[in-house]
Image (tube, grey):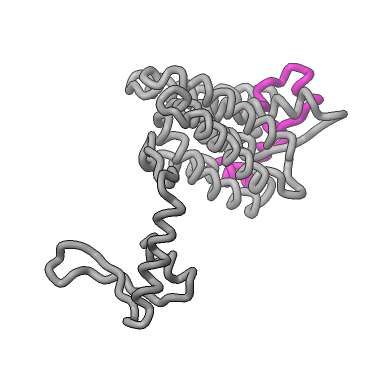
Amino acid sequence: MDWGLVLVSQGIEATIEASEDGSGWGLVVAAQDYEQALSAIGQYRLENRGWPWQQPVLQQGYLFDWGSLAWVLLVLLFFWLDGRADLRSAGAMDTRLLAQGQWWRLLTAIWLHADLGHLAANATLGFVLLGLAMGRYGTGVGLLAACLAGVGGNLGCWLLALGGHRSLGASGMIMGALGLLAAQSFAWRARAPQARKLVFSGILAGVMLFVLLGLSPGTDILAHLAGFLSGLLLGGVLTLLPALAQKATTNLLAGLLFALLVILPWWLAFRQS
């Protein structure tokens, strides 16, 4: 395939075909192009002799956890409930009320969305990024870490926003999942000679995706940034404890804690209202 690309770059048409006896593959060129094709391939091999085109893959493929679909269903449930009861006044993020002690808004705001478009965007992107984060760190651990990153996003709004700030939505949690995925490259830091390069590449890729997905005009950029940085920090910590994070008991406890962080804040919100 590499040689075929070399020939195409030189204007030589070539076809990759299997040998008749099934022993291998070859390039078929027109008879008048034969000598020129050999010369181009020879020059390519000479120029790239010793060049490290191929690098060892430290982790092949990605696991996707379909448990993220349950998160999507939970988000849809809250959107449906919000259409029948006024959940926003009790649970939306409001920095002034947060300063008065209503800390549960850091969590309840994650489950509220402004409209169907807002919901669809977060549910679609969250399904993918949370599924990958949960596949990497474990179902319960990944979900809990992303939730805590979402709290970090809302907390960042409270600490850094000037004046009153109101917001709602799961985008901080979703950007937190992106931060968790970017941070997984920390696990490669001592596994190969090119580890530093791979760690830098992983973080840079996460930052570029954040710029693409998290800095859209009209969105809560501050919550996105704080959520992404929180996910990056939590992911870095989790890469130091890979065996613990993958244990079934740890994921069960993390899942139970996540459920508690959904139920308790809403109970306090309804009680207050």
> In the rendered view, would you say 14 is above or below 48?
below
Report the side of 112 relative to 186 (left or right): right
Question: Which residue shows up at 40% across the image and 36% down it?
Answer: 135
> In the rendered view, would you say 3 is above or below 146?
below
Whole-percent x, y for residue 262 in the image? 54, 28
Front position in the image: 247 or 93: 247
Question: Which residue shows up at 40% across the image and 77% down it?
Answer: 13
Query: Residue 179 is drawn in which quadrant?
Result: top right
Front position in the image: 87 or 156: 156
Question: Which residue shows up at 44% across the image and 65% down it?
Answer: 6
Query: Residue 229 is drawn in which quadrant?
Result: top right
Considering every residue shown, the one lying at the far right of the view is 163
Image quadrant where one finds the C terminus: top right
Whole-percent x, y for residue 145 in the image? 52, 26
Question: Which residue shows up at 76% across the image and 25% down it?
Answer: 158
Front position in the image: 158 or 98: 158
Whole-percent x, y for residue 174 in the image? 58, 38
Image quadrant where one finds the N terminus: bottom left
Front position in the image: 8 or 104: 8
Report the side of 179 relative to 59 (left or right): right
Q: Which stretch did the figure color magenta?
A: 77-106
Whole-percent x, y for residue 46 in the image? 42, 54
Whether residue 266 can be seen here:
no
Query: Residue 146 is drawn in which quadrant?
Result: top right
Whether residue 115 can be seen here:
yes
Residue 103 falls inside the magenta stretch? yes
- Count of picture labels: 0
Residue 179 falls inside the magenta stretch? no
> In the rendered view, would you say 38 is above or below 233?
below
> In the rendered view, would you say 60 is above or below 23?
above
